[in-house]
Amino acid sequence: MKKGLHSLLHKSVISLVIVMAIHSQSYCQLSAGNYFEGGLTVGPMVFMGDLGGHFGRGTSFIKDYNMKATKLSFGAYIAAHPSEVLGFRLAINYGQLDGDDAYITPKGGYEVARHDRNLDFKTNIAEAFFAAEVYPTVIFEDQPTDVTGRLRPYGVIGVGVFHFNPQGSYVDPNNGSTQWVDLRPLHTEGQGFPEYPNSKEYSLTQLNIPMGVGIKYYVNEQINFSLELLYRKTFTDYIDDVSTTYVDPSTFYAHLSPSQAQIADLIYNKSPLRSTDPANYGPGAKRGDPTQKDAYFTLGLKLGIRFGAGREWNNSTRCPLLRF
């Protein structure tokens, strides 16, 4: 009996040491870190919505990517990392979005109707968001704080706010000059008009959900570079000022000033088939697709710099090795 208890105690001690070793290693891998990082971002920004796009049906995802709509964006960020596996980022970005039905190359499919619609837009866009970063492969690393030369994939998800102001190209019938005019004040789909009670005026400031993936390379303990694909899901279909149906142009003259009404009449429907095909391009005909909200994404090249800790701090946080 005594021998059996001794054997059981011995096995229990060994099991406890193994569990503590595993727990210690896992804890160190998850808790190692506690630093800040700041940096800059630059890269292309692309709109996904009703205007422009690719062949087939229009979508709000990457299938509808058209290189002609690519613009440049810039940003800055600061992130707090309570551990090597987790970070919390606050970022600001500025760029431009645009869409143009003329970008589409008709191939005889659903894209022909969008091409013949002949609308365009552009907008500057400013955003700020708060997001979590997760580095899943850190849990497999022996020394997570020894980052020099490491390559780490990561995921990002958060919540943000952005501001936009869509403009459309307007050709002055008096002199043929082209200018860009703000679209929201023109109520191009009857937003706010009593004749269209279901068409509400939209806000130029909206929420979004940034989500994406990236891969980060650490040049050394202080400097790193990342390549990050970040998609923004939005809750508006009016980034491009296009969503539902064509309205009766007489409502512009009933509710706007004469000069605004003339601009709205010429800019809300620029299809060359406007007068010859009223079933598809006249009042009540489909102008956009309200079932799919607008979206946009960036492919950012990021330069990050760690601060708030030096080499001595970094070495002091390494997990001790348990030896038996």
Image (cartoon, grey):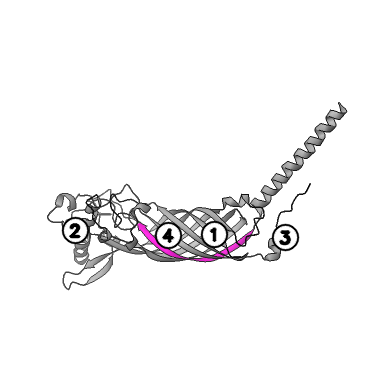
State left or right for residue 217 relative to residue 316: left
Does residue 205 appear in this view? yes
Q: CA distance from mark 4 to mark 3?
A: 38 Å
Q: Is residue 165 visible?
A: no
Question: Mark 1 and mark 3 in contact (Cβ < 8 Å)?
Answer: no
Crowd rating for badge 2 (residues with CA inside 10 Å; few <14, some 14–19, many 20+): many
Which residue appears farthest toward the right when viewing the image?
Answer: 2
Type of amino acid under label 4: Thr
Residue 44 versus residue 140: which sits nearer the camera? 140
| Image spot of residue 94 (x, y percent) | 43, 65
Classify mark 4: helix, strand or loop.
strand
Which numbered disc, 3 or 1, marks the residue that appears first in the sequence? Answer: 1
Q: SS class of the residue under badge 1?
A: strand
C-alpha span from label 1 to label 2: 46 Å
- 123 or 146, nearer to the observer: 146
Residues marked 1 and 2 touching at CB (< 8 Å): no
Q: Position of residue 115 (x, y in %)?
A: 23, 56
Decide: marks 3, 2 in contact (CB < 8 A)? no
Amino acid type at mark 1? Lys
How packed mark 1 is, by other alpha carbons closer than 10 Å (few <14, some 14-19, many 20 or more), is many
Q: Amino acid at mark 2?
A: Ser
User: Label 1: which residue?
Assistant: 216
Q: Earlier in the sequence, mark 2 or mark 4?
A: 2
Tag shown at residue 298? 4
Q: Hey, what amino acid is under mark 3?
A: Ser
In the rendered structure, find residue 271 and report the number of the disc placed on it. 2
Name the spot of residue 272 as percent of width and height, x first. Answer: 16, 59
Quadrant housing the N terminus: top right
* Numbered range of the magenta stretch: 34-47
Q: Residue at x 73, y 44 (%)?
A: 20
The residue that label 3 is drawn on is 316
Q: How many marks?
A: 4
